């Protein structure tokens, strides 16, 4: 049987909330998901938070063209050389500049130094009102990533 996780990451990959805010957010999230295991993690470096088996496709955030996986792998390799401090890319379809974090990952994915995680959640996503409460506690906008391993 596979495991799944609901991961909540800041939209800004470098954002790390205060220790106090993290504790309050974990307590609040536990009250939302009841019997599920809730954890948090903070790293010194930005890392890619992927969707695992929930990956569908990758698209340009501007023209919505599907992006080639080899182009993406090369862009990820270049970004990794800077330990993901520089996520800037120029998409091959329309030539516009964006960030690896802002590509249209289907299912969602992103980059972060901080994450909240619910192990084997009962639903696919948290309701908007719950996300808004967590964003208020943490002081940042959040992205939901459903990861299946």
Image: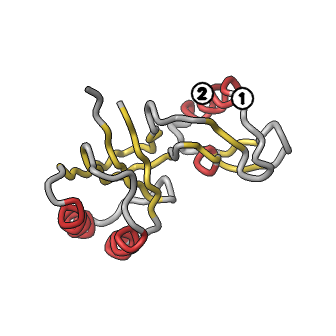
Whole-Å distance between the Cαs marked 1 and 2? 14 Å
For the point 44% across and 62% down, which residue is it? 142
Q: How packed is label 2: few (under 14 Cα within 10 Å), some, or many (20 or more)? A: few
Image height of 5 relative to 141, above or below:
above
Q: Nearer the viewer, mark 1 or mark 2?
A: 1
Task: Give the position of the N terminus as an image quadrant.
Answer: top left
**Residue lying at the far left of the rendered structure:** 35
Q: Which mark is drawn over residue 100?
A: none
Picture coordinates of residue 78, whole percent (x, y)? 63, 30
Q: Secondary structure at mark 2?
A: helix
Task: Identify the coloring.
Answer: secondary structure
**Is 31 left, or right, of 86 in this rendering?**
left
Q: Which residue is mark 1?
A: 68
For the point 81% across and 36% down, which residue is it? 92
Image height of 1 relative to 22, above or below:
above
Image height of 93 relative to 70, above or below:
below
Q: How packed is label 1: few (under 14 Cα within 10 Å), some, or many (20 or more)? A: few
> Which of the 4 image quadrants contains residue 5?
top left
Q: Secondary structure at mark 1?
A: loop
Picture coordinates of residue 85, whole percent (x, y)? 54, 44
For the point 40% across and 49% down, which residue is it? 113
For the point 26% across and 63% down, which residue is it? 22
Q: Which residue is mark 2?
A: 77
Asked whether the beta carbons under mark 1 and mark 2 sit within 8 Å of each other, the answer is no
Residue in the foreground of this view, choosing between 10 and 82:
10
> Which of the 4 image quadrants contains residue 140?
bottom left
Residue in the foreground of this view, choosing between 13 and 66:
66
**Is 109 left, or right, of 125 in this rendering?**
right
Task: Give the position of the C terminus as an image quadrant.
Answer: top left
Q: Earlier in the sequence, mark 1 or mark 2?
A: 1
> Which of the 4 image quadrants contains residue 93?
top right
């Amino acid at each position: 049987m596979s495991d799944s996780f609901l991961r909540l990451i800041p939209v800004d990959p470098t954002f790390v909330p205060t220790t106090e805010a993290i504790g309050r957010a974990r307590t609040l999230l536990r009250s939302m998901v009841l019997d599920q295991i809730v954890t948090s993690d903070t790293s010194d470096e930005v890392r890619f938070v992927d969707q695992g088996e929930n990956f569908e496709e990758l698209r340009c955030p501007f023209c919505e063209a599907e992006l080639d996986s080899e182009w993406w792998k090369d862009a990820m390799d270049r970004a990794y050389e800077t330990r993901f401090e520089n996520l800037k890319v120029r998409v091959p379809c329309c030539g516009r500049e964006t960030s690896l974090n802002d590509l249209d990952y289907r299912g969602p994915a992103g980059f972060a130094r901080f994450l909240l995680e619910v192990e084997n959640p009962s639903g696919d996503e948290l309701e908007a009102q719950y996300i808004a409460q967590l964003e208020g506690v943490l002081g940042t906008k959040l992205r939901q990533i459903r990861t299946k391993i």
